[in-house]
Amino acid sequence: MLHQDASPYLWIPGDARTYDLVVTMDGATSALCSIFLVDEAGTASSFQGLREVVARHGLFCSLYTDRGSHYVFTPEGGAMRMTS
């Protein structure tokens, strides 16, 4: 199972800009499969991480993510519906 998440932070010393660190890792071993910085995480960066994993390691069986808006549509607070 892969786990993918992004964290905004002041990652680069001396750079006042906030970047999102996009990490895709093996959920069982915590091995990093893909890791990179972007201005703002979204659908394109999520797919970039998955593309890198497949290119380096082959297909995976499952993917776990948080409830980021590029994965889940939430029309009202507390409501959740998976996007297709």
Image (tube, grey):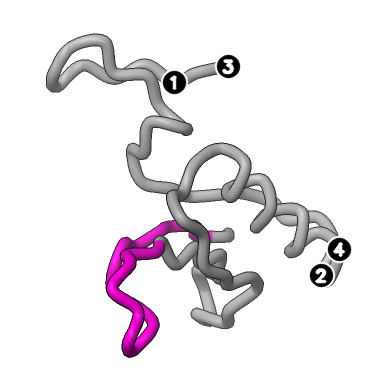
Per the image, label 2 sits on a secondary structure element best described as helix
Query: Contact (CB < 8 A) between labels 3 and 1?
Result: yes
- The amino acid on which the numbered mark 4 sits, given as a three-letter code, is Ala
Circle 1 residues within 10 Å: few <14, some 14–19, many ≥20: few
Left or right, residue 19 beside residue 33: left
Instruction: Identify the mark at residue 57; answer none if there is no mark.
Output: 2
Query: Contact (CB < 8 A) between labels 1 and 4?
Result: no
- The amino acid on which the numbered mark 2 sits, given as a three-letter code, is His
- Which residue is tagged 1? 82
Query: Contact (CB < 8 A) between labels 2 and 1?
Result: no
Name the residue furthest top: 75
For the record, the magenta segment spans 3-19
Distance between mark 2 and mark 1 Cα atoms: 27 Å
Is residue 81 depicted above or below 23 in this figure? above
- Residue placed at 37% from the left, 16% from the top? 81
Name the residue furthest bottom: 13
- Residue placed at 46% from the left, 32% from the top? 71
Whole-percent x, y for residue 40 in the image? 43, 50
